Amino acid sequence: MRRTEAELRAVLTRTPQMNTLLGADFNQDWMLDWQSAEDVLICRIDEVDSARKRALLREVKSLLSALETDQDVEDFLDFVGSGLVPTIDFAQSARAWLCGIRDRLQDGLEITD
């Protein structure tokens, strides 16, 4: 069952930093500003301080709780106006990509803490 606009909006209000990453950094023409999708993640996830990583991690976990299927994640990406297509840009399903972001943030916190 696809998520309604109201459900997606509710998820969005709980995840403002991920909205910035997905809707602003990965906007429709993100390729004009970045060399690769990986470069966006390095800059916006790997190179941020621990407090920001913790906040992003909380939001990613919230997204994973709310968005249970690949279709849910894809609908959310569309809803925030993201130009990211995980199957193309990372060769992963949408939900697997989001799980990878969670793992990347957790690993980054273990290294810096």
Image (cartoon, rainbow, N blue to C red):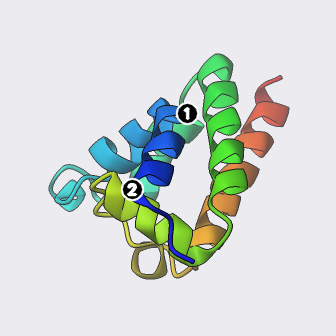
On screen, residue 86 above or below 23: below
Residue 95 sits above or below residue 20 on the image = below
Query: Residue 68: horizontal and vertical position, in percent?
Result: 68, 66
The x and y percentages for residue 95 are 62, 69
Measured in 3D between alpha carbons, the distance from the residue under mark 1 to the one under mark 2, in whole angstroms, is 15 Å
Decide if residue 110 is on the left or right side of residue 93. Answer: right
* Number of the label disc, if any, that sits on residue 14: 1
- Which residue shows up at 40% across the image and 60% down it? 77
Residue at x-position 70% and y-position 61%: 99
Residue at point 68%, 61% (across, down): 100
| Viewer-side residue, 23 vs 40 | 23
Front of the two marks 1 and 2: 2
Image quadrant where one finds the N terminus:
bottom right
Q: Where does residue 96 sit, x and y in percent of width and height?
A: 66, 71
Q: Specify the quadrant of the image occupied by residue 54.
A: top right
- Residue that mark 2 sits on: 5
Residue density around tag 1, few if under 14, some if 14–19, many if 20 or more, within 10 Å: some
- The amino acid type, in three-letter code, at marker 1 is Arg
Across and down, in percent, residue 23 comes to 32, 47
Q: Earlier in the sequence, mark 1 or mark 2?
A: 2
Report whether residue 36 is seen: no
Disc 1 is placed on an element classified as: loop
Q: Residues within 10 Å of mark 2 (few under 14, many from 20)?
A: few
Classify residue 33 as left or right of residue 36: left
